[in-house]
Image (tube, rainbow, N blue to C red):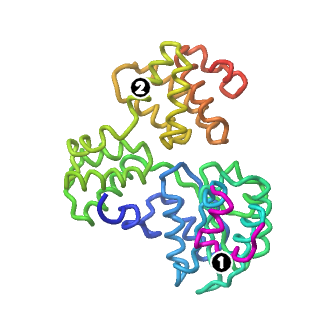
Amino acid sequence: MDGPLWTSRHAPDLSEIRQTEARERLDRALSEPMNLVVQGPPGVGKTAATRALAREAHADPDNDLIEINVADFFGRTKKEIRNDPRFESFLAGRSGMAKRDMINRVLTESAAYAPMSGDYKTIVLDNAEAIREDFQQALRRVMERHHRTTQFVITTRQPTKLIPPIRSRCFPIRLRAPTIDETIDVLATICDREDVAYDDDGLEFVASAAGGDLRRAILSAQATAVEDESITMSTAYETLGEVGHDEAIREALAAAVDGDLSDARSTLGGLLDDEGYDGPGLLREILRVARAGSTYGGDELARLHTLAGEVDLQLAEGLDDQLHLTHLLAAWAAGRETIAVDLRDPDAAAATA
């Protein structure tokens, strides 16, 4: 894709965040610096909102905003961490350190540095649901020790994965998945800035295909503009028609209806493990694909949405995504009488799946 990504080139200012409650809470954090937990599903703008806050809060955001993705630590070897140019100055001359000690040192030293401008700096920890509890305890101590000069912003899709002492020290900011109209508004604004021709049907197609993932919608719009120089229904379909995984989801729905839960479970597992979906995101896609065709009647769709409401709660609490989505399809296919059966019971769900 040519040129900078639109998600970077058109990163929103604080005033451009369209979710009113979240924007007002971020504004409050400007006048009363506080630790934050920014929570919501993937692709809704958690990191973008955090960067917008930092640009507004700091005269020198390049130096007073420190971003650490949890995968930078927990998904890498000690050698990879030590050789990362962002961390090597903290770890130079300290060979033989355990991984836990390396992580603690980077966090402690980052928090201990004096801000370059103003009274405090901001440390962002992205995807914090992956932090083990023992490391969270160490993080809590760092937060306590440096609370006067360092604001911690924790982004996560699963706030219940955070230990209570951390949650109690942070003000929650919730970002929901944007509506289709909100997504279209963002895309239209970007296209106007880029002088890219579009029509309403084209933007609606891109927004609908993104399934509530704003980042995916913006990148899909850019891909279409690069490929065809305009965004219409036909150009968007030609560019994006093969990008999604609608056919795989239709196969999972059909397998459940046919009673082949093993195939349904395998397909869902592939989408979760290999295609980058998380549980709530895949749930939204299942509902969208089920609605899009004429295969299922109104009663069947209503029953699917009823069951999905309960499963969505289980996914938000961080339970096994594949297990609960498989059980959703199993209960839906079995009929209305199964609506109340064991949706909250993982052991029963396992037996059904």
Q: Amino acid at mark 1?
A: Ser
Pick the front one: 145 or 274: 274
Position of residue 277 measured from the top left corner of the image (x, y, whole percent): 51, 41
| Residue 109 location (% of width, % of height) | 71, 76
- Dot 2 falls on a residue whose secondary structure is helix
Secondary structure found at label 1: helix
Residue at position x 60%, y 86% from top? 116
Q: Looking at the picture, does residue 55 appear above or below residue 71?
A: below
| Residue 5, horizontal then vertical, whole percent | 36, 62
* Residue occupying the point 42% across, 29% down: 248
- Which one is closest to the eye, mark 1 or mark 2? 1
Q: Nearer the viewer, residue 229 or 329?
A: 229
Residue situated in front as seen by the camera: 261 or 173: 261
| Mark number displayed over residue 89 | 1
The numbered mark at residue 250 is 2
Do the CB atoms of the residues marked 1 and 2 lie less than 8 Å apart? no
Name the amino acid type tagged 2. Answer: Arg
Label 2 CA crowd tier, 10 Å (few <14, some 14–19, many 20+): some
